[in-house]
Image (cartoon, grey):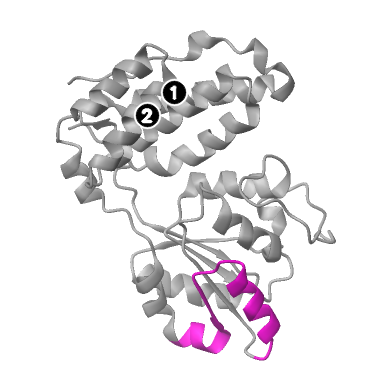
Amino acid sequence: MVLPDNFPPPLPLIVAFVADLMFGARIESAAERLGYQLKWISSIQAIDPQAPPSEQFERTYQLAEHLSGSGALLLEQLTSWRPALIILDLSNEQIPWREWLPLIKSAPATRRLPVICFGSHVDTATLKAARSSGADAVMARSRFVAELPNLIQKYARLTDYAALEETCQAPLSELALKGLELFNRGDYFEAHEALEEAWNEDQSPGRELYRAILQIAVAYLQIERGNYDGAMKMFLRVRQWIDPLPDICRGVDVARLRHDARLVRQQLITLGRERIGEFDRALFKPVHYHA
């Protein structure tokens, strides 16, 4: 099997939305001892450089995927980083967590990412709001500090790369082969149906290969239908399934598929919503595989 240079990634990542650098250093120290790397996000400008420092965050937001503004940039970064855990300081006034937390926990591309929130034990309204927004764990700052190593071990969501490597040596199922043939004929709806059935019948980690390909099929179908937003949402969602895979999985050239899908997405972004009708369908490349 051919594995990518970064398979598996060097260290799993924790993203911490924390402004207090001294406190952040404590989190980083605990994370490093457990074999994680830490990325600090102290303010909205780390995600959206165009956001003014004194921005009064709006209290209205759209759940699921944002396609513009800081919410879109947040989802883009998180799907790229694929953190094992997100830590959010509810006292960090430089982060619009009341908007970002429900967005993270509702968007299909990020809702599986575990989020731990901590704040002042006397600010029960804020702690309750974080729970209502979908956080996986919410607690007082003192408890967070005392239990940090255990919390990381309990809530971090790690990809089992050894299991992926092993399961990617299995052959494609008959249903998957049918789905790939349909995909390569440009029958993207039918390909989705066959690959979804293949995914449902396979309970191994390798099933995510089928989910990745079927979501790309849906993205291409949405482009054919002129649905810019639908296609962009599918491209955002697919990264969580395709990025962890080895470059070759069950005979499928995953690296090439990633590359082709990125080119399609980039062309879509270049054209924009108003010019999607000009999309060059020659960019829809077949899935290369050896049965």
Q: Is residue 235 above or below residue 138?
A: above
The quarter of the displayed image where residue 287 is located: top left
Q: State which region is magenta.
A: 122-146
For the view shown, which residue lies furthest in the bottom direction?
122
Position of the C terminus, as image quadrant, is: top left
Q: Position of residue 13 (x, y in %)?
A: 43, 58
Q: Secondary structure at mark 2?
A: helix
Total numbered circles: 2
Q: Amino acid at mark 2?
A: Glu
The image shows residue 241 at horizontal and vertical percentages of 39, 41
> Magenta span has 26?
no
Residue type, mark 1 in image: Phe
Viewer-proximal residue, 173 or 273? 173
- Secondary element type, mark 1: helix
Give the residue number, with chain letter if any, for mark 2. Answer: 193
Q: Residues within 10 Å of mark 2 (few under 14, many from 20)?
A: some
Q: Which residue is mark 1?
A: 189
**Residue 89 point in image, percent of width and height:** 61, 73
Taken as a whole, is the magenta stretch helix, strand or loop? helix
Towards the viewer: 202 or 57: 202
Q: Are marks 2 and 1 in contact (CB under 8 Å)?
A: yes
Q: Nearer the viewer, residue 217 or 45?
A: 217
Residue 265: in sight, yes or no?
yes
Q: Quadrant of the N terminus?
A: top left
Q: Which mark is residue 138?
A: none
In screen coordinates, is 263 left or right of 3? right
Instruction: Classify 258 as above or below 185.
Output: below
Q: Is residue 176 left or right of 80 when viewed as pictured?
A: left
Please rate how many residues cluster around mark 1, counting C-alpha atoms within 10 Å: few if below 14, some from 14 to 19, many from 20.
Answer: some
